[in-house]
Image (tube, grey):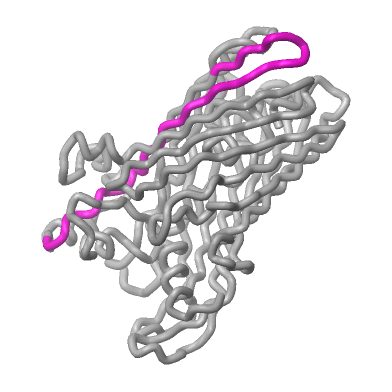
Amino acid sequence: MKLKSLKLTLMLFAGGLLTGEAFSQSNAPTEINVVTTAVPFLRISPDARSGGMGEVGIATSPDVNSPFWNLAKTPFNESKGAVGLTYTPWLKRLGLNDVYLASLSGYYKLDDIQAISTSMRYFNLGNIVLTDFSGNDIGNTRPREFGVDFGYSRKLSDKVGLGIALRYIYSNLVGGQNVNGTTYKAGNSVAGDLSFYYNGANEAGNGFSAGATLTNLGTKIGYTTDANQKDFIPANLGLGAAYTKVFDESNKITFGMDFNKLMVPTPPLQGDSVGLAEYRSKSVVNSWFSSFTDAPGGFSEELREWTISTGAEYWYQNQFALRAGYFYEDKTKGNRKYFTLGAGLRYNAFGLNFAYTVPSGSGVNQNPLSNTLRFSLIFDFGAGGSDTPSEE
């Protein structure tokens, strides 16, 4: 990183220290009211398959990255087990080479109806030069964050599965540093996921599937000793559906759509000191339920807090895949809108997926993944079995 002021800004944004107070007190129009959280890296698409489909993953066919999207899909994998690794450059469009997200996932089926899994996300923000309000150097830091989880999933029937996961979250942005009179420390949190999956496909692979997830249900995270300054983590409700059409032995296509909403309080509007105090003091459990009714703009604003992902995946002879997708977020809630493209290859036990985010936006509205190529490498323990490449 080169620009000192940019470094600190990027660090605070990517790490999540900017809260609802920072946005509501800005000079932006009051109708712009972005829901913010700490550790937002937990909501970055962590694999290239879903990344190429506009971040669709809740109800698509199960694969090694199911622990990230919908753990309940895992027992429906045909393979005994698999391991996947993904590398995602971050802010490449700005010429940054030391900021990236790496993810690792794996599962193992205990039998035909239950599976265990694990996954890890590691977000490295590179080297940051800290400055005070006068622009004077006050030290260097290498902020980093990670989340690691372990899960168990089980089929309730041939069509229905449930999953549960426990996650540990670590965020060290400027730990041990004194910035403008405030001493920061590393933040820690514990969270859990609950997942549901319905597989309505017939024996030929045709049919609908659906899923629902509650993710990152956990404690607030703090970067100082002040308990009143703890921030919400990105608890999320996800709903997804997908439809697969198998044309013949060589050709099939899947269409999917996901809806996601952060179960986090909507920040109060500028000047609402009472609302800000209530926002800060709200309990975690209360925030999950109130997040569906607390928007200052009422029901219409609540609807704008949902993001929409749509995507398609085409497989030829279970060896080559093409993908495309679109992600939409309302302009008053972050204004992320972008297209994605992707491709996949599979040969025996190995698979390789690529995703590309089409450049979009400019300035503060620029997508951090614009013009970025990310890739996933997959090793399938069940090679030679009945596993289908479309699952990877």
Q: Residue 307 vs residue 149: left or right?
A: left
Assign the C terminus to one quadrant of the image.
top right
Residue at the spot 32% in from the left edge and 42% down from the top edge: 330
Residue at the spot 77% in from the left edge and 34% down from the top edge: 345
Assign the N terminus to one quadrant of the image.
bottom right
236 w.r.t. 88: above or below? above
Image spot of residue 203 (x, y percent): 68, 8
Image spot of residue 171 (x, y percent): 50, 65
Q: Is residue 266 magenta?
A: yes
224 w.r.t. 249: above or below? below
Q: Residue 128 vs residue 48: left or right?
A: left
Q: Judge by depth and name the residue closer to the eye, 90 or 378.
A: 90
| Residues shaded magenta | 243-271
Image spot of residue 336 (x, y percent): 41, 47
Q: Judge by depth and name the residue closer to the eye, 48 or 266.
A: 48
Image spot of residue 109 (x, y percent): 73, 30
Residue at the spot 35% in from the left edge and 60% down from the top edge: 231
Which quadrant of the view contains residue 245? top right
Which quadrant of the view contains residue 238? top left
Residue at the spot 25% in from the left edge and 63% down from the top edge: 21
194 w.r.t. 249: above or below? below
